[in-house]
Image: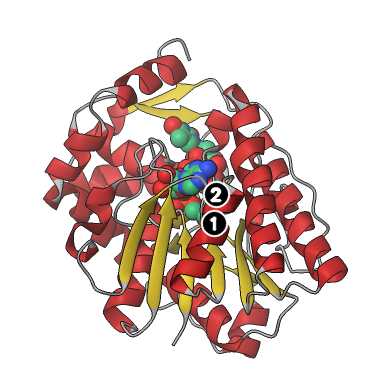
Amino acid sequence: MRKILVTGGAGFIGSNFVQMVLSEHPDNLIVNLDKLTYAGNLKNLAEFMEHPNHKFIKGDICDGPLVEKLIDEYQLDTIINFAAESHVDRSITEPKLFIETNVTGTLALLEAARDKNLERFIQISTDEVYGSLGSEGKFTEQTPVSPNSPYSACKAGADHLVQAFGRTWGVRYNITRCSNNYGPYQFPEKLIPLMINNALNDKELPVYGDGLYVRDWLYVNDHCTAVWQVLQKAPPGEIYNIGGCNEKANLEVINQILDRLGKPKSLIKYVADRPGHDRRYAIDARKIITELEWRPVVSFEEGIIKTIDWYVQNQPWLDNVVSGEYQKYYESMYKDR
Ligand code: NAD
Ligand code: DAU
């Protein structure tokens, strides 16, 4: 049994992870520390708020004394750091906020892990730290880190700090670098839920550039099982890429969404490209597959249908997150694009 500080557990991947652990491994304790930014949503955890092995704490990962207090109070042995500012476009308009949470926040957690001699620190990183690929090849764990956006630069900085704490103070860590996730509870600023929401409302679908940028999609539950496997089996000091071999051009994904929802292709609108836009990501996940016996189980064809149908069936969840602040965000990001 583990006693885990999960940070960012009210966000997209974090809340799916908390749900998975409490459903499938319910003897583990989860203390869930989340600042509840625009991306954090307790509705994601509605069925689990009263679970005896889930304690939700509203707070900031930059708050070192709070983190240390939680470790002492609940006798925690592990930190899994999902908390982050996670959207590339926002990092282009507000990079400083990304340094604060993604770098300074990770530093505060590392200091607590070191000072309290925790058994394990797992940093949830991203394939974006490797930069961009041309039409050939995949990222391996040996690919040099070469981030291009303020978001990925901060994530890479955090990864370096994690490794430095391992080397300097013996903090037992793992770093995971996953490709693009999709599935229930993703905030509709990211490609798939944004396009689903717009299509459902017969709004234009804003495609950046030529729409032929490629992402390697992984259903969120498969990411969660990979992180669980790392926690159970990985030796300290190892980095693992996580991905499902599901490379798709953005337009292909958008067309699948339109087809499922029975909406016309005329909704597609080509808009100005993202500055510094990475052309292609693709993950070589052989290390985690062979060394930790992890396998993704949801194909893209199955996962995209499940995801679209989830948003259709959970209209109140979607209506709630797109009200208020989201409208301002959308206008500022897309109005004159
Ligand atoms: P998200 O934006 O949906 O959720 C982030 C969560 O962190 C929110 O609940 C937010 O309230 C919380 N948070 C933000 N700042 C905080 C702070 N200072 N203190 C405490 N909590 C804070 O993000 P996501 O898509 O679920 O991503 C989770 C992690 O996985 C991130 O570290 C991200 O870099 C990484 N990742 C994401 C993807 C993806 O496709 N979404 C892929 C690979 C890796
Ligand atoms: O690769 C992992 C990363 O994937 C994570 O680390 C990030 O947290 C996550 O946000 C995601 O980053 P991307 O930039 O790849 O995801 P996003 O959904 O923003 O964009 C996916 C692709 O779709 C990208 O090529 C940009 C394009 N796009 C996106 C939006 C929001 C559009 O064409 N139009 C849009 O409106």
Quadrant hosting residue 103: top right
Q: Secondary structure at mark 2?
A: loop
- On screen, residue 168 above or below 127: below
| Residue 104 position in % (x across, y down) | 67, 44
- On screen, residue 30 above or below 260: below
Residue under label 1: 67
Quadrant hosting residue 194: top left
Q: Secondary structure at mark 1?
A: helix
| Residue 261 position in % (x across, y down) | 19, 45
| Residue 54 position in % (x across, y down) | 31, 68
- On screen, residue 337 above or below 264: above
Point 67% across, 37% down: residue: 99
Q: Is residue 301 visible?
A: no
Number of callouts in the render? Answer: 2
Q: Which three-letter amino acid code belongs to the residue tagged 1? A: Val
Q: Residue furthest top?
A: 336
Residue under label 2: 61
Point 47% across, 63% down: residue: 6
Q: Residue furthest right?
A: 168
